[in-house]
Structure formats: structure tokens, C-alpha cells
Image (spheres, rainbow, N blue to C red):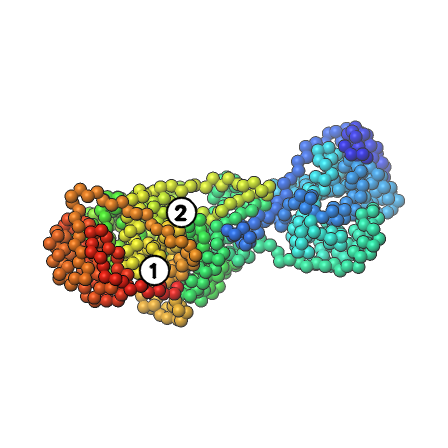
Amino acid sequence: MKQGRLSAIPTVMSLLAAFLAVSVVGGFLGAGLLIPATAMMGTVVKSGTEVYEALPTEFTSVVPQQQSELLASDGKTVIATLYSENRIVVPLSAISPWMQKAQVSIEDHRFYEHGGVDLEGIGSAVAGAALGGTARGASTLTQQYVKVTLEKAALDRGDTKAAKAAKAVTASRKLQELKYAAQVEKEMTKEQILQNYLNLVYFGDQAYGVEAAARHYFRTTAAKLTIPQAATLAGVVQQPGANDPVKNPKAALTRRNVVLDAMHRYGYIDATQLKTAKASPLGVIKADPPKNSCAASSYPYWCNYVVNYLKTLPAFGTQPNEREGRIRRGGYRIVTTLDPDLQERAAESMGRIISPQDYPTFGAAATTIESNTGKIRAMVQSTSYNPTGKPEPGKTQVNWGADFRYGASGGFSVGSTMKLFAVIEALKQGKGESYVIPDIRPPGTPWYPRDFQNGCTTGAGAPWTPGNAEGDDPPPGADIGIATRNSINTAFVALAADIGTCNIRNTALAMGMHNSRRSAEDGSQDGKPLSTYPPTLLLGEDASPETMAQMYAIVANRGISCPNTPLESVTDSYGKKVDLQLPGCRRVLEEGIANQAAGIFQTVMTEGTGRPVQIGRPSIGKTGTDADNETWFVGATPQYSTAVWAGTPDQNNGSWARMRLHSVDGNARYYPKAMGYLIPGPIWRGVMRAAHDGKPVVPFGQAAQPADDGRTVDIPDVRGMSVDEATSAIEAAGFRVTVGGRVASGYPRGTVARTRPTDRAPKGSAVTLRISTGVRSTPRAPTANRAAAPPAAPPAAPPAP
């Protein structure tokens, strides 16, 4: 114990007993406050020592609330500063010595000499009050720390009555404060007491603690506070409202000079420093308040997503409200996965097609994730954030890119992007790309409950009569490849009847597919993660862009699913990394199945409905169109997966034909029909090109070749032949022939450009002829069993996003 500090508690108690007697006679309590003698009558029944010993002795310091920061993936871009109290806790070494001296000078100049109770100050205060003066100097800085701590602890637990009692002018409260102060001085050093005090007290204008106050009033740090700045802040603490340098600058200046005089009086500054400091202006440069809500953030939808995500993590507590409270009070440094550059470029890509002026009739949203990590790198939509919740043109609070639990969106019908799961289930059953789908019926032909697998069938009402929204009607003998590339609904209905609708659903569930709304224990609003109704299961489940991006990422990532996450890392106020206990990546598809699916969905981009929006590197993709004006484009590479939705968020009666939107070249245009490659497709292309800018080309996994058990045979090379010549050659080899669409190639117009499949196929299966348009491009490279192809012209440069 330092020199001058009381060495034993009995000494303190005996002196307190004497002090009580003086207080009763004079009618004063020695904290420098006048209290009627009647307030002491119940206390002085026993001796001062007995009263003192009967008081509680357990004093617990509080951990001050401090702000948490949300940062972008670069660790520098501030997304939001979340807090209940604007406070940043710092060690005493990070607080200017001038600040320490200023606070001690004005609050308790004998701070380093007493043991928590300043009897000299008490005596002076009592004497001064008895003589009719103002009682001052009795309450030590340690006592003030005790009072502030008790009040803060009570407020943190929601006990307003105890908070009021912590600063009540009563004899019992003051005695308790004195006893706690003595305890604190035994358990803490002077430096610890001063550090805790400066981090805890209120400095006015919503600034708690000296670091937040330094940033708020002077745009500096506590470590860099000058003599006049330190004196200004030290002067605020006694009466934060009256001495607020923003709202009451004259009072603050007067109070600052009082503090400067005290610093000079007690030897902390010399006469020259005093003169210079007093001559300086107040110098307040009020900083903008921290972004204490997601509404104030530059990335409001993302900020809300992250906060809602954090509220689901057990690492922060057992209940959502408890978790959010800890996040706002715990001083966490939360580095998110958001890539600010990609976010900006994704928003630009969307804005070229759909912008806030198109809402509420039309809207769009896009989510981009890393295929092999699940980290969300961009999440944009075509609206501005609505902080009030009142209807405003072009604004909403709903995050369309996220699941319901993270953004309040119920999702949108994903249309034909659901065909992914039917293709994968067919592959799992050994039915490859060239598998001819049986019983394809013409559009409008009825399908009945008996046509589908029990448990996943249509209702007992009118039969289902599907049509085709995107692709042409299927040619005779259409296979899985043709049906996928051309997005033929009627072919997929037949495929679902063939392989089993419940089997498709089970595959989707195994991959993690779910309805956007999640409230039941298994993840959905109604207790069913996915519908069992074939029209919904095949062509229209409601889901979010973040979910669909993850589904296609699984295929691009060779069958491994990585749950979406917005977090890179979280560290606590001590710099310790928080164990978030996040689920890791896991295999949900056999690698060979995933790679076969990737091969099929690559042809969507090279030969099918996704061909207009290629990105200049291998990719998988799928368009989606729903009868209710919802359009989608979802696609991926082994590096990134992006899902884009565009549609009518609040109504289903908007007509694209009447909507004057923005084309890729920046000019306005009308879209005659809602098609995935027309509206969300160009947005997807722009986002994915931005995501891959400067990145190397990463190949997809190679599909396992089927065992050659004698049933697969070579397909004749018919490139450059007429359709009749090619048909005869392929039929002679034991295959059936279908004629598909036209493709650009170096072969003469009207001749065969290539076949699907290309090399080998089961005998008796269908081989599709692709007919050349005569436009020179890059034909498929020859394989070992084929003759060399004619030389090809260099490929044309891809169109601008």
C-alpha cells in the first residue's frame, strides 16, 4: 500500500465513527452534501463502527459496454458501429497523461495519497458547510468510481430503482460507498481505478468513456489529447449536460479554464502552459456520430443480414435478444465477407437493367458466394433502404436476396432453376445426359395423381396440364441434355414421373434446398422444407437468391456444400478470436454425379438458354421463368456462384411487355416477355465478370466415364454432312436420331455442326444433330476416335455486360 494510504480498516472505521458523530451534531453528511439530522436518527442508534461493519462488503466492478464494429472483408471499410452506449474501452497507457492529470486535478487532487476515503476532505467539507459555505472536496475519485459502477450495474440489469438508489443523497448510501471505496483501494491499484473510471463515465452528447469522447468532440484519440482538450473533457464529467461543449460551448469554456487553474495549482502545468492553454479556442470539431444502426449504414441490407445471422449463433448467448444485446455491448470486431468492390460493381450491373425507379412494380436482387467456402461476397438489390418503414418510392426494408430469417423476404418462385434436382436424381439413377425421356406428352396434355410417385403427387382435383414457358416443344425422343438445354417443362414432367417425384425431393433436401420461410423446427414456415406438389417441386418453389446460389455452388464445387456465411472472423474486446462454431463444408453429392451435372449445365451456357450471357470462361447456368412474372438466372464457376432474381415483389400483375427498363447498353427498352436470359441474365453476366476479374480460369471436375460393358458404342463423326447423310450414318450405327437447334460453327450453313453426345453412347439411345448457322466460331476439339476438324476462326469477343 502506497505511502499516505490508510494501512488498516480498523483505523478507517474508528475515524468514520468519529465522523458520524460530527455529522449528526452538525446535521451534515461528510460527502460534501447537506442532509437533515433526522435522516441520521435511525442510523446513530448504534455506534458508527457497528453500522459500518453491518454494511455489505461485496463490490464487483462492471465490464463497461462498448461499441462493436462491423467491417467489410478488407478489415477497414466500416459497415456499421453497433452499440447501446457509444464507448471504446482503452488501457491507461492509451490515455493522454494530460487527461489523467486534468481529471485528478479537478476531481480529487489527493487521489494518489488517500486510501479511498479522504478524511481531510471530509473534515473540510463538514467545516465549510457548518460555516455556511459550500461543502466540497469530500467525495474521492474512488468513491465516484464506486457510485458510477453501482449505477451502471443496476442499469445493465434493468433495475432502475437500484440505479436511482446508487446516487441517492442518504446516509446509508454514503456509508456503503465509503466502505466499497476502501475495498476497491485494497483490490486495485490507483492506475486501475483511474483507467476504469475514465472508461466508464459519461462525457455528454452520447459519448461514454474518454476514447469515444476524444473521437466525438475533437476527432482524435484519447492518447493524443492536448492540455486544453483534456481540460475540456475533464470539466464535462461533473455536469455533462451543463458543460457539453457542443450544446453549451460558453459554459464548457469557463469550466475548462477552471480545470486548467486546478492543474496549475497542483503543479501539473506551469504558468506558460496555463497561459497558452487558456488562450486557445475550445476547438471542438464534432465528428459525425457512429453508425449506430443498420439504417445509417452505407450497406443497410447487408448490415441487417449480418446482425440477424449473429442472432442465430449460440456463441453469443442462448436467445436472439440476449445475443443482440451482447453484440451491441461487447466491443466485438466483426469482419464480414462483403467485398466492397464487388458489391459496388454488382450494384452497377443491376442498375443498368433495373433501378429504384422501377419499384414497386418491378425489382431485382442478386447474391454472390464463393463456391468452395460459402462466403457471401455481394448482396445487392434494385431498391434503396427505407429507414422509416413508411411507403416511399423506390425503397423497402425487405432484403430480397436473403432467406426470411435474415431479411424478411418470403422468397420468389424459382421456376426452371429447380430442374437442377431432377437432373441430379436422374444421374444418381444411372440415367445420363443422353437418356431418352419416356412418355413426353404434348403441352396441355393432362397428368393425373396416379402418374406420380405416392406421397409426392398432385391433388384429387383437376389434372395438371403443364406447358412450356422458355423452350420449344420437345422433339421426338428428347433426352435429358436436350430437355435441360432448352428448359422444356413437359419433358421434365415426364422425367419426374419416370424417376419419382419424392426421389427428386429427397435429393433436393439432401443438398440443403429449402423454402425461404423458416420457422418450424425443420426449417420452413409450415413444417415442410419443400413442397411435395409436383408443379411446385419441379417448377416453382419459393426460395431466395442466397439459397439458389448455394445449390448451384454445390455442383460447381464437385458435390461439396459449404453453408452460406457472412463472417470472416469475430474478435472480442480483448483481441481474442471468438469460436463461432459454424458448420463446416460437407459432401452432399458423389463427385462423379456432381461433375456429370456440371457437364450438362455447361451446355446450357454454350448451346442452350444461357448462351446469350456467357462470361468468357466455362460456367454452369440455368434460366428460370415463372407464370407470375418471376425470372431467374443462376449460375456458377468453381470460384463463384451467383443467383439473380427479377420480378414483381409486391404483386403478380405487372406486365414486362409494358415495362420500360434499361438495356445493357444503357438505353431504355421494352421487354416483350419475361425471360431469364433477357432480364436477370445480363445482370448475372455483369456480376460474374466483375467477380472473376483478374482471376485464373479454374476447370470443372471431370465426370467419371461410364464403364464400357459392351453396351456403349462409337458415334460416327458426321460433322459437315447434310442432315440426311448424317441421319443415315448414325441410324446405321444403331442409334435413333433427333434434330436439335442451330449453333454457330465453321461448317457450311445447314450441315451438321456436332452431335450430342459426342463420342460414345448406349446403343439404341438418341443422338441429337446440331445444325450449323454458317457463322464461324470454335468447333469442339477432335477426340481420339474422330478425324480432325476444319480450322476454326478465332472466337468473337464476348459482348459487354
Residue identifier under label 1? 614
Rendered image quadrant of residue 793: bottom left
Residue in the picture at 80% in, 38% down: 113
Q: Which amino acid does label 1 sit on?
A: Gln
Q: How crowded is mark 2: few (under 14 residues within 10 Å), some or many (20 or more)?
A: many
- Where does the image place residue 747, in percent across and percent down from the top left? 22, 64
Residue in the picture at 35% in, 64% down: 797
Quadrant housing the C terminus: bottom left
- Where does the image place residue 494, in percent across and percent down from the top left? 21, 51
Say if 361 sits above or below 270 in the image: below
Rendered image quadrant of residue 122: top right
Residue in the picture at 66% in, 49% down: 211
- Please name whichever residue, 206 or 474, is drawn nearer the observer in this view of the structure: 474
Say if 464 sits above or below 668 in the image: above
- Dot 2 falls on a residue whose secondary structure is loop
Q: Which amino acid does label 2 sit on?
A: Asn
Residue 395 left/right relative to 499? right
Say if 180 sits above or below 721 in the image: above
- Where does the image place residue 95, in percent across and percent down from the top left? 70, 47
First reached walking from the N terminus: tag 2 or tag 1: 2
- Dot 1 falls on a residue whose secondary structure is loop
Residue identifier under label 2? 372
Residue in the picture at 85% in, 41% down: 124
- Please name whichever residue, 800 or 548, is drawn nearer the observer in this view of the structure: 800
Is residue 280 visible in the rendered image? The answer is yes
